[in-house]
Image (spheres, helix red, strand yellow):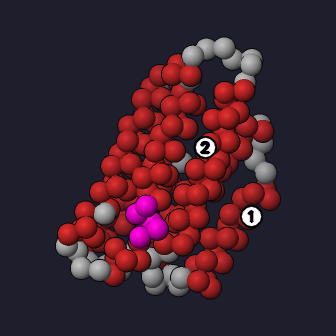
Amino acid sequence: MFAITAPLKLLTLVTAKMGIHNIPAYHVLALTEVIMVYCFYSRLAFRKVYLQGVLLLAALNVGISLFLQPVSTFNSIGWTLDMLVLLTIGILYLFHLYNDESDQSPLEQRPVFMITTAWLLYAAGSLFTYLMGTSILSGKAEGFFHNAWLFQCVSNLFKNLLIAYALWRQR
């Protein structure tokens, strides 16, 4: 997953620094991220990926990009719904972890618990920014709007650190 989303995020950073319009890449990134996280949790919880879920998420994101917020604008509706989906999936998987009687090990020793916590922190921190995305991007970069992306950046940093730690523990 990181092998696909990391280059997309780097591409958006480089193109932004070069002054190149990169908003369409965020439409692709939203679609890619939510489908990959859905596939990850679907495989963990059900031992298979339900194609209907993938198609529903793809149709939702493409529909928003085509009919509600064009590819030339930031897709705050798509990102907001994707963060709500990630929060829902993460909370449902935490419920599954808590009810799993086959594994009696403490939660903090389970890498999947740390990964889920990381995704929940990221989705919660990003949700606010994406809800306000249109206002943030269309307002002057001063005061509150200048610092609003810090919520998303900090939550993304914590997510990456927690996932890296969990993967290191899992080896």
Decide if residue 150 is in sight here. Answer: yes
Q: Is residue 69 left or right of residue 14?
A: right
Q: Quadrant location of residue 91?
A: top right
Q: Quadrant location of residue 116?
A: top right
Q: Where is residue 42 in the image (x, y as percent from the top left)?
A: 71, 44
Q: Which residue is drawn at 46% across and 44% down?
A: 121
Q: In this view, does 56 lie to the left or right of 107?
A: right
Q: Which residue is drawn at 52% across and 19% down?
A: 109
Q: Which residue is drawn at 53% across and 65% down?
A: 80
Q: Which residues, given as a range, are shown in magenta?
A: 128-132
Q: In this view, does 124 lie to the left or right of 41?
A: left
Choose the circle earlier in sequence order: 1 or 2: 1
Q: Nearer the viewer, mark 1 or mark 2?
A: 2
**Disc 1 from disc 2: Cα separation:** 19 Å
Q: Position of residue 71 (x, y in %)?
A: 51, 81
Q: Quadrant location of residue 97?
A: top right
The type of residue carrying mark 1 is Leu
| Location of mark 2 (residue) | 90
- Whether 106 is drawn above or below 66: the answer is above
Please tell me whether residue 125 belongs to the stretch shown in magenta: no
Sort mark 1 into few (<14), some (14-19) or many (20+) by Cα contacts within 10 Å.
Answer: few
Q: In this view, does 49 lie to the left or right of 33?
A: right
In the rendered image, the residue lying farthest to the front is 144
Decide if residue 7 is in sight here. Answer: no
Q: Is mark 1 on a helix, strand or loop?
A: helix
- Whether 141 is drawn above or below 118: the answer is below
| Location of mark 1 (residue) | 55
